Amino acid sequence: MTMEIAQETPIRLGFFVGVLLLMALWEMLAPRRQPRLPRARRWPSNLALVAIDALTVRLLVPLGAVGTAIIAEQRHWGLFNQIELPAYVSIPVAVVILDLAIYFQHRLFHAVPILWRLHMVHHADLDFDVTTGIRFHTIEILLSLGIKMAVVVVVGASAVAVLTFEILLNATSMFNHGNVWLPGPIDRVLRLFVVTPEMHRIHHSVHRQETNSNFGFNLPWWDFIFGTYRRQPADGHEGMTIGLTQFRESWVQRLHWMLLMPVFGDVGDYPAKQHSPDMPSSSASGKLE
């Protein structure tokens, strides 16, 4: 198992760079929406924040979720370290459980104002593209890692399962934030199995009812099951406004403001009124189509 943690960084970095480049190329060849700001205004800060996040995690929590899985296995912590299951069962089940935990974590960061202060850095992006999917405040990244480590210990997920989940979560986050065009029939089939850009874009609407829907990053099933699925945005995908109502100026793209936003930024009314209607109810539907 020591091989997994030793190889984690190059494996994850390879997938990260590969998916980022593929999505960037797709966005250039077949964009879904006209960007509000040029990439040169957004990408340097978004990517710099990713670099800060990665460096901070490496310095403060070098063990990571994969290392936690190895220790849990060595000390027989967690459910799957107490029972004998074949890898082809334990790995996918652990991945699904971890994804469910991230779904509820995401809802928690929308519901609790102090956590929303961190998460609104992600939502304050004025455009929606592949770099939005990796734009998270450093403290949120650390808290998310802590939650994942706790779940790994309780579940007893193997290092292979955790590494698989981390790669999938990172890749699907970049995919479902992509400013890419997908034919309708393909999207309708895909969103039964994975969160698509058409599905997740709604989550980045300025309308609070839409912001507080479609929480899934990887698997879409949790939104279907727990009633947080929204089929289409009220204003349409091309007409909808991306971001938050309280942050409409381009300064929110600057790195230092992203880092300071949880302290000085206005939380708006997003966390407090998740269930109060602010748009026609016909825009929300659990119908899978």
Image (cartoon, rainbow, N blue to C red):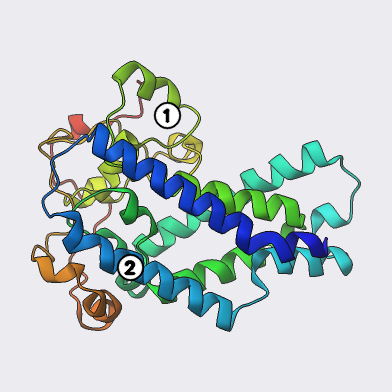
- Residue 168 x %, y %: 55, 46
Q: Residue furthest top?
A: 185
Residue positioned 39% across, 64% down in the render: 109
Residue positioned 65% across, 48% down in the render: 164
Identity, as a three-letter code, of the amino acid under mark 1: Arg
Q: CA distance from mark 2 to mark 1?
A: 26 Å
- Residue 254 x %, y %: 20, 73
Question: Mark 1 — residue?
Answer: 191
Q: Which mark is residue 206?
A: none
Identity, as a three-letter code, of the amino acid under mark 2: Trp
The secondary element bearing badge 2 is classed as helix
Examine the rendering and report whether any part of residue 181 can be seen: yes
- Identify whether 273 is placed above or below 221: below
When asked about the image quadrant of residue 119, the answer is bottom left
The C terminus lies in quadrant = top left
| Left or right: residue 8 compared with residue 76 | left
Question: Mark 2 — residue?
Answer: 116
Which one is nearer the viewer's eye here, 91 or 53? 53
Q: Residues within 10 Å of mark 2 (few under 14, many from 20)?
A: many
